[in-house]
């Protein structure tokens, strides 16, 4: 990664750690301490971690740093957090409540048949939303920076987002559909 902004990668890793720490804190506050409102507020604030990362990214580019892979990755993080955040929170909340607050056993995701196809299709649609949001965030950053020389590398993320959607479809809904067809025989 010569020429890559090491600080930005450190911030990306830091934001990923912060995401999971805030999630854990929200669950502890909600289920162990019994402070439902505060726990819910903490869980809803998870996207703010990625918003701060994207803001730092935009400011870094505005200062004249040429865009790299890391700058685009920050936008993808925000898109995926917004799109998948509620499902990640629900998944973690069910498991945490079951283990630490005598909650019901968590639901298990379907792995076979048409239920798995529908489940994977729903996740793929969230992937599309995440990638559209990420590309929209990139457009906002590009407009904010207003320097084509600096932001030109960010345009590669349009292909990355399309690739993500394409491969998610192949290894998600299509894979489940083929498996469901085989099991129906």
Image (cartoon, rainbow, N blue to C red):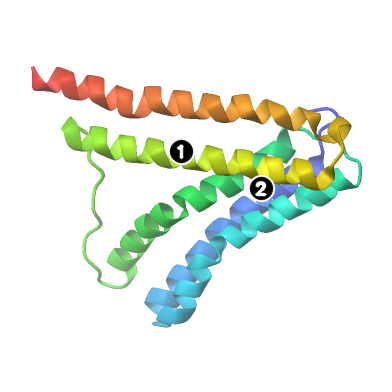
Q: Nearer the viewer, residue 161 or 41?
A: 161
Residue 168 on image: x %, y %? 43, 29
**Could you classify mark 2 by the number of other residues whose Cα lies within 10 Å: few (under 14), some (14-19), or many (20 or more)?**
few
* Residue 49 drawn above or below residue 129: below
Placement of the N terminus among the 4 image quadrants: top right
Residue 54 on image: x %, y %? 70, 50
Q: Which residue is drawn at 36% across and 55% down?
A: 91
Res 152 → quadrant: top right
Q: Which residue is drawn at 42% across and 59% down?
A: 89
Which residue was labeled with disc 1? 127
Q: Nearer the viewer, residue 178 or 131?
A: 131
The answer to whether residue 105 of the structure is visible from this angle is yes
Q: In this view, does 137 lie to the left or right of 177?
A: right
* Residue 172 drawn above or below residue 135: above
- Which numbered disc, 2 or 1, marks the residue that appears first in the sequence? 2
Res 27 → quadrant: bottom left
| Dot label at residue 13 | 2
């Amino acid at each position: 990664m010569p020429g890559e902004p090491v600080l930005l990668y450190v911030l990306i890793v830091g934001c990923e750690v912060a995401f999971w720490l805030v999630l854990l804190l929200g669950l502890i506050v909600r289920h162990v301490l019994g402070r439902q409102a505060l726990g819910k507020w903490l869980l809803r604030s998870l996207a703010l971690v990625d918003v701060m990362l994207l803001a730092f990214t935009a400011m870094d580019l505005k200062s004249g740093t040429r865009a790299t892979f890391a700058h685009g990755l920050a936008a993808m993080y925000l898109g995926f957090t917004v799109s998948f955040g509620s499902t990640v929170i629900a998944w973690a909340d069910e498991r945490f409540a079951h283990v630490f607050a005598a909650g019901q056993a968590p639901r298990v995701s379907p792995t076979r048949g048409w239920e798995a196809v529908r489940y994977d299709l729903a996740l793929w649609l969230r992937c599309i939303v995440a990638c559209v949001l990420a590309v929209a965030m990139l457009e906002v950053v590009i407009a904010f920076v207003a320097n084509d020389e600096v932001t030109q590398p960010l345009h590669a993320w349009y292909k990355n987002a399309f690739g993500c959607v394409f491969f998610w479809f192949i290894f998600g809904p299509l894979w489940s559909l083929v498996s469901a067809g085989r099991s129906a025989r």
